[in-house]
Each structure stands twice: as C-alpha cells, then as structure tokens.
Amino acid sequence: MIDEVFPRIVITGAAGFVGEALLRRLSACDLDIIGLYRSAPPHSVYPSNVRLEKVAAYEDFVPPRSARLVHLAESRALSQAESLDPVAHVSKVRSATCELLAREWSHVVYASSSAVYEDKSCRLHQIDDDVNPTQLYGKIKKTCEGLVTSCSGASLRFSNIFGPGMSSNNVLSDILSQIRSSGPLTVRNLSTVRNFLWVEDAADALKLAVLNSASGIFNIGQAPAVSVRDLCQMALNLSGQNGRTLRENNQDAARSCLQMELEVSQSKLKWEPQTSIEEGLIMLMRDRGLI
C-alpha cells in the first residue's frame, strides 16, 4: 500500500530519456521531487513541486531526511571503458554507487537492464536466474543490482525502452532513420529478438516501485518479444512502404535472442504496460513526422 504521507523523491539522471518521463509522471502527484542532472538540464518546464539541481557527481548530493531515491543515471564513457580497462570501470562505478547508497535513503529503486541475461537461447529468463553477463554494460548493471537489493531496494530489469527522445544508437532509431529513403531497409541482423517497452510505461513501473517501496528483482517489458524483422515490417507497413525489401549487413552473426518472463514481476509490482509495441511505434513515428 502507498504510504499516506510521502517524503521527497530524488531522481538521478533526471535530464535523461527515462528521467524526464518519470518527472512528468511524478510531477502530477502531490509530491516533492528533486531531479538531479550532471550536464544539460531537462527540456520540459515542471510545476513548483519539482526542483532541478545540477551536481558534479550524484554521490556528492546530500538528500533530505527520509528521501527516496530512483537511480537512473548511466555510466559515462562506456565505449571508452570497454576498450581501455573494463575491470577498472566496473570497480569505479561500484565505488560511486556505494557512496550514493551510503546516504540516508528511506528506499532505493534502481533502473537495471535485461542486458544482465545471456542472449544465446530464446527461453524466457526468470528473475531468479543465475546471471553472469559478459558485456561491460551488463556487468555494471549486475554489480549495482547487488548493492541495491542488499539494502532492500528494488532493481527493475528493463527491456528495450523506446519513445520520443530516445538514443539514436539503437535498432529502432536505425530503422526509422531509413523510412524516408529508398531501396532496401538495412539492419545488422533481422533475426535478433527482444522485448520492447514504451517509455511512459517504464516510468509508471518506476513510479509504482518507489511509491510502494517495492523490493527485489523485477523483469519489466512488453510481451510478446519481437524480432527486428517484425519491427522493420511494422514500420514499413505504417509508412505505406510495405513493398520495400529488407537486408541485413551481418548475416554471419550468431543469433541473438533475449526475452524475459514478465507475468511474475507484473503481479508482484501490480503493474502492466498500457501501450503495445505497434501503438508506441505509431506515436513515435507521428512525433517524427514519418506518418
């Protein structure tokens, strides 16, 4: 049950893609919100119950008494760390997260990722799977998850989140960038399979987790999982280009399939997505003037 009296809620990465969506959701409630950011501030204008604050490092912020934390901020310079010293980078992120969690938070919610799971089989990954990620991003997520759950917090393993303002460095952005061109629509691999999730649904999951003091691990996404081929065809159909051919530029890559079991987490969190992948894609394409 949601507490009758809410403390302040602090959001790291408030200027990010998911951070702004969460600010919009929480600002409509009778809550005091502090949105922390490290570089450019959030784009939107928020009501007086939202305070935005620039910090050099999130772990330096001293929270108000009994504040709750939603930790969304991602590690900087991930690509450089991957090629230079990934072990040292994981250690650095762990230290910073330990410092942040050492503050007197009444509850912590962490935005983790499905990247902690392996992608070599299409079985449904369960929240109690023994995860052993091989990529740096997944290792960082697993490390931070352990720190959060050890203090009775919640770690939400999100599938691929999409919506206006998302990064240009993902397969859906790659697909949409080719809608106005001609010739074959080309992607890395058409057989890749993932769960996807509309950004406002992701924000609602975070909102419920922090307000209800959820604890443990949760798989958060939209079922069923879809292939990149299906995404391409969906986008082409919506734009009236269903006659275009599809091509992949890395046919020899091993098949990547990652899908999560979602019903247990939805039941525990009392949350379910409201926007289908097709509905979200329509809104995103309209936002970009593609349909």
Image: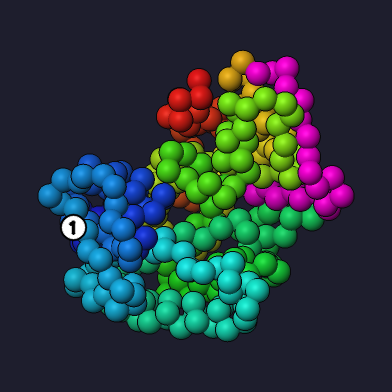
**Is 142 situated above or below 171?**
below
Query: Magenta-highlighted stretch: main secondary structure?
Result: loop
**In this orientation, which residue lies closer to the viewer: 30 or 216?**
30
Residue at 42% of width from left, 79% of height from top? 96
Asked where in the image residue 90 lies, by quadrant, the reply is bottom right
**Is 33 situated above or below 201?**
below
Q: Could you tell me if residue 281 is visible in this image? A: yes
Residue at 12% of width from left, 49% of height from top? 48
x and y percent of residue 267 in the render? Answer: 51, 46
Q: Which secondary structure, mark 1?
A: strand
Identify the amino acid type marked 1: Arg
x and y percent of residue 191 in the render? Answer: 78, 41
> Which residue is farthest right?
252
Determine which residue is flagged by label 1.
51
x and y percent of residue 118 in the render? Answer: 72, 60
Residue at 51% of width from left, 42% of height from top? 162
Colouring chosen for the image of the structure: rainbow
Residue 256 magenta-highlighted: yes
**Is 42 situated above or below 25?**
below
x and y percent of residue 290 in the render? Answer: 51, 24
Q: Could you tell me if residue 11 is visible in this image? A: no
Q: Which residues are magenta?
A: 241-264
Asked where in the image residue 9 lies, by quadrant, the reply is bottom left
Residue 246 magenta-highlighted: yes
